[in-house]
Amino acid sequence: MVSNYYILYYTWDEFTFEDCVTSMRALGCKVDVIAGAVKDYHSDELLISKIKKRCTDAAYDFIFSFNYFPVISQAANDCQIRYLSWVFDSPHLTLDSVTLKNNCNAVFLFDYVLYEKYRNKGISTVYYMPLAYDSLRIEHKIQSILPHYDHEITFLGKLYDDTYNFFDQINYLPPKLTGYIQAIMDSQQLIYGQDLCDLIFTQEKCRELAEYVQIDMGEKFTDYRDELFRNIIRKKITSLERRSILEMLGQNYSVDLYAPNTPIHLPVNYRGYADYINQMPEIFYTSKVNLNITLRSILSGIPLRVIDVLGSHGFLLTNYQQELSEYFINGEDLVWFEDKEDLMDKTNFYLTHDKERQRIAENGNHKVQQNFTYTELLPKIFSIAQI
């Protein structure tokens, strides 16, 4: 049991805030909260001064935030206090800040391949830690819902075809380079467990693309350009993949889509945006099949969506991710598909085999309750950071 830690928690209104603070307090920690939007990742003097004042007025053991904020690292460094950051966004641009090497930092990444990339660059302030959920809140929510099904197949996630789809804004590349990128995107949609962008879109190709696409984040960021290019391509691959899969499933089954924006030309039932705290657990619990299609910038890690579905006693059908096999058994705790044909076969099977589907959902729930709760993982974070 963790106890006696005094934490200054910075929140930017992230959806994980309430669950994490509740869990910290359940572990015996005292938690103060500082809130507000960051105006500049490196030089928000107002936020820096607020943090410094709070650290002067109270004897905190450390500052904590979800995702990494260079300004908080700067303030923590000045105050000689540890800064613990748990990153759930992917990609997360601020990881390429020059401040990442600050000795005060302990930055936790849920993607082991990404963790290794930073370690191989000599950055010793990053650590590996999968993501978590609040089992007590979810169990309380589920107990109030009568067992029934409202959805045949549910997909909850973005289609990445909005104004932040930067790939489609690049429309002036030479045909040879365009064809090379298109070949990567076509091939990647057939392969899980191996990132072709990292393997094939080399530094040489990044330099070639840089002749047509200018990116300058300034001197406070380092080594960002090539990976930023790759993530633009990965995001486009995800958009194409999600639309293609939903198109295929929607022509054969009833598919409910929860997303921020109305989809165009997809045979699905658009249900709007789903609230993380109040709506998602019930949606996952009352869906026969919950579908996960991982954002391709997550190279090996287990997305939070996987944990949330299993934590809600939902049955999960997901693409393969390398780290899934380290924690789960395929066909016992969840089900992963190898390709679109496999996805169709497994969708049909599990929609028509209720007892098998329910058995797997309960096994998956047991696994995440053992390994992926905040009360299980937060003490590990504190221990690794040597608090």
Image (cartoon, rainbow, N blue to C red):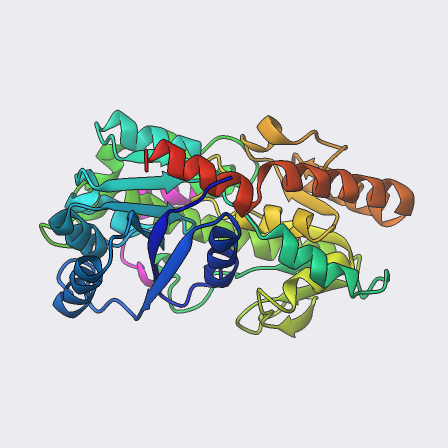
Q: Quadrant of residue 96?
A: top left
- Judge whether residue 234 is colored magenta: no
Q: Residue at x 66, y 49 (%)?
A: 311
Q: Residue at x 23, y 29 (%)?
A: 121
Q: Position of residue 17 (x, y in %)?
A: 45, 61
Q: Position of residue 203 (x, y in %)?
A: 24, 33
Q: Residue at x 50, y 50 (%)?
A: 238
Viewer can see residue 340 = yes
Viewer can see residue 152 = no
Residue 298 in the image: above or below residue 200: below
Of 125 and 271, the residue lying toward us: 125
Q: Quadrant of residue 353?
A: top right
- Left or right of 273: which side holds 238? left
- Left or right of 359: which side holds 31? left
Q: Position of residue 9 (x, y in %)?
A: 35, 58
Quarter occupied by the C terminus: top left
Residue 181 in the image: above or below residue 265: above
Of 299 and 1, the residue lying toward us: 1
Of 135 and 235, the residue lying toward us: 135
- Left or right of 264: which side holds 212? left
- The prevailing secondary structure element of the residues shown in magenta is helix
Q: Residue at x 90, y 43 (%)?
A: 355
Of 349 and 80, the residue lying toward us: 80
Range of the magenta residues?
Answer: 168-183
Residue 29 in the image: above or below residue 166: above
Q: Quadrant of residue 283?
A: bottom right
- Left or right of 129: which side holds 178? left
Q: Position of residue 77 (x, y in %)?
A: 15, 47
